Image: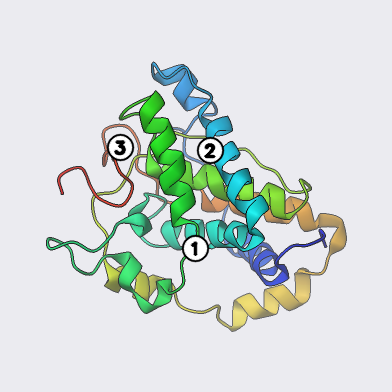
Amino acid sequence: MPPCVDAALFLLLIALHALLPAITNAALQDGFYSSNTNCTVDVEATVASVVQQYVYADRGVGAGLIRLHFHDCFVRGCDGSVLIDPSPANPNPEKTSPANGGLRGLDVIQEAKRQLESLCPGTVSCADILAFAARDATRILSSWTISYRIPSGRRDGLASSASDATQNLSPPDGTTKRIVGDRAMDPGRWEVKSGDAMGKIGALDVLTGDQGEVRRFCHVTNSS
C-alpha cells in the first residue's frame, strides 16, 4: 500500500476498477486546451500548483478532492454539477443532499478556476478542473506511485438536483465489499488498478462540444 494514503479510499478505487467497464470518449483529448483553444497557459500545471498548495497544508483536502470527483461523476456524469450552490432558482442542488455531507476541496476548485479565468477567460471548464485536481491529489497522496492521464474537453452541466445525488450515491453494497475483500490487497497491482479506476470514473457521461457550458464561476451556472 502506498504510504500515508487514506486506505479506505483506495480500497474503494480498486473495487470500482472491477465494477466499471472500460470507458472511452473520443471527444476528450490529451492537451485539449493547447490544441483547441487560444489559451497559452499550461492549464494542468496551473491546477496542479493550486492542489499542491492546499494538500501539502492539509492532506485531508486531497482525499476530499477525490471524493468530490466521485460524487460529481456518479450523479449526471462528470459535469461539475456537484459544485453548484443553492439559489432561489434552485434551492436544492446536489450539495444539499445528505449523501454530500462534509464535502471538502471546494475552495481548491474555486481558486484554480479564479486563476484560470484571469488567464484564459471562459475557456476551462469546472468539470475539467475537478478531474485534474482529483488526479493531482491522487498523485500526492500516493507519493506519486499512482498517476494517470486525464483527457480533457469536458463541459459544465446546467442542472443539479439533491434528489439525483441521494438516489445515486448510496453506500457500497455487498458486491463491492466482496470485491474489496477478494482483490484489494493484491499489492502487485495496487497502483495500476487505482489509476485505471480513476481514469474510468473521469470519463463517465461527460458533456462535450456544444453541450452544457463553460461556467464563469464554478458555484453558479452562467444564467444565474
Q: Residue 47 has which mark?
A: 2
> Which mark sits nearer the N-terminus, 1 or 3?
1
Q: Crowding at label 3, few (<14), some or many (≥20) Cα neighbours within 10 Å?
A: many
Q: Is residue 202 above or below residue 70?
A: above
Q: Secondary structure at mark 1?
A: loop
Determine the CA span between mark 1 and mark 2.
16 Å
Closer to us: mark 1 or mark 3? 1
Q: Residue at x 54, y 32 (%)?
A: 46
Answer with left or right where residue 43 lies relative to residue 166.
Answer: right
Q: Amino acid at mark 3?
A: Val
Quarter of the image with the N terminus in it:
bottom right
Look at the numbered discs 1 and 3 and tell me whether their residues touch, using CB distance below 8 Å. no
Q: Crowding at label 1, few (<14), some or many (≥20) Cα neighbours within 10 Å?
A: some
Q: x and y percent of residue 57 in the render?
A: 64, 54
Q: Residue 104 has which mark?
A: 1
Look at the numbered discs 3 and 2 and tell me whether their residues touch, using CB distance below 8 Å. no
Q: x and y percent of residue 22 in the render?
A: 58, 50
> Which mark sits nearer the N-terminus, 1 or 2?
2
Q: Residue at x 42, y 51 (%)?
A: 78
Q: Amino acid at mark 2?
A: Val
Q: Which residue reaches farthest bottom?
A: 174
Closer to us: mark 3 or mark 2? 2
- When asked about the image quadrant of residue 216, the answer is top left
How is the protein colored in the picture?
Answer: rainbow
The residue labelled by disc 3 is: 214
- Could you say which is closer to the camera, residue 79 or residue 178? 79
Q: Is residue 158 above or below residue 85?
A: above
